[in-house]
Image (cartoon, rainbow, N blue to C red):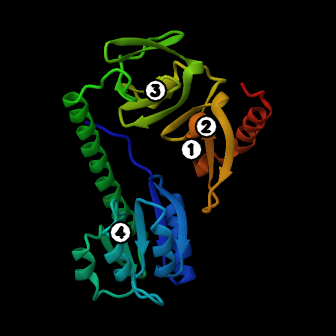
Amino acid sequence: MEVDSPCLRTVVVDDEQLARDLLKTWVHRHPSLNLVQEFNTASDALKWLQDNPVDLLLLDIQMPGITGVELAEYIVKLPTPPYVIFCTAYQQHAIKAFELSAVDYLVKPIEKSRFIAAVDKAVHHARQQQVFELAQRLVSAARNPPENGDSSVTALPLDHGKAITVKRGDEIIQLHAEDIIWVEAASQYVYVHANQGRFMLSETLSSFSENLPDDGFIRVHRSALINTQSIRKVIQKPNKLYAVVLEGEHTIPLARSRKDLLPMLLGFAKQASHAPRA
């Protein structure tokens, strides 16, 4: 079972500015990492992480206030703890770090090759987790076929042409492009979020998008394709990233690499604000 390479939401925590700057540079250059926040104290990171789940933490140990190890002891108790790579000048904490299931332990000065190797381990773990979760969903779907009216349903393969034929229980439904709010990638599957509900198709997002109008849908994230007519507003997150709010209050993050789409998205949001309400 093959899955796409994950893009890990990454946080850097280090009290030394030069160390943070170096790590941020390497994070920006790695194709599987997306820097979402940085902190110079573990206590500030702790407060933020309580409300903002991430995938990877690049964590120093000796910092003012609580240490990196103490922060790691807390986050391992979270429902979905991030992967942790310790980046420190001290070797004596290595055993404790691995007791906390750290992905790797990098000793400063950190060589770029060691950084890449450590990140590749985290990416591998994330990919394996994706495979496991996908297998669980497929087994669950096979054991619990959806009933009529269920919002999470399996669907028939994509038909080429003007409509998508989907199945909910015994009911056959024709979805047209204007019915679709957004499409979510899930490895070799997509979830189609439509006015009629949510449907799962055995398609990749790239192949599915080939059957949609080029001028009506925009890929705002590697895992999200949105209908421009469903855009209601654009919001800015505390981490200075943006998100698009769609019909039905679906909130989809705008990838940092797609920030050039912002003027266009704001234009569609403005049109929606002036459109007459039914």
Q: Do the residues labelled 1 and 4 touch (CB within 8 Å)?
A: no
Characterize the local packing of mark 3: few (<14), some (14-19) or many (20 or more) Cα atoms within 10 angstroms. some
Find numbered disc 4 in the image and state the secondary structure of the residue it sits on.
Answer: strand
Q: What residue type is labelled 3?
A: Gly
Q: Name the residue under label 4.
A: 84
**Seen from this angle, which residue lies furthest right?**
274
Q: What residue type is labelled 1?
A: Thr
Q: Name the residue under label 1.
A: 251
Q: How far apart in space, not on screen, are marks 3 and 1 (Cα)?
A: 16 Å
Question: Toward the viewer: 112 or 149?
Answer: 149
Image depth: mark 3 or mark 2 in front: 3
Q: How far apart in space, not on screen, are marks 4 and 2 (Cα)?
A: 34 Å
239 vs 60, left or right, is right
Q: Name the residue under label 3.
A: 197
For the point 28% across and 44% down, which residue is it? 133
User: Residue 27: x, y in percent?
Assistant: 50, 63
Q: Are marks 2 and 1 in contact (CB under 8 Å)?
A: yes
67 vs 11, left or right, is left
User: Residue 229: x, y in percent?
Assistant: 66, 28
Whichever of labels 2 and 1 marks the residue nearer the N terminus, that label is: 2
Find numbered disc 1 in the image and state the secondary structure of the residue it sits on.
Answer: strand
Q: How far apart in space, not on screen, are marks 3 and 2 (Cα)?
A: 15 Å
**In the rendered view, would you say 157 is above or below 123?**
above
Whichever of labels 3 and 1 marks the residue nearer the N terminus, that label is: 3
Q: Do the residues labelled 3 and 4 touch (CB within 8 Å)?
A: no
Q: Mark 2 points at which residue?
A: 246
Image depth: mark 3 or mark 1 in front: 3
Find numbered disc 3 in the image and state the secondary structure of the residue it sits on.
Answer: strand
Q: Which amino acid does label 2 sit on?
A: Leu
User: Residue 119: x, y in percent?
Assistant: 37, 62
Q: How far apart in space, not on screen, are marks 3 and 4 (Cα)?
A: 37 Å
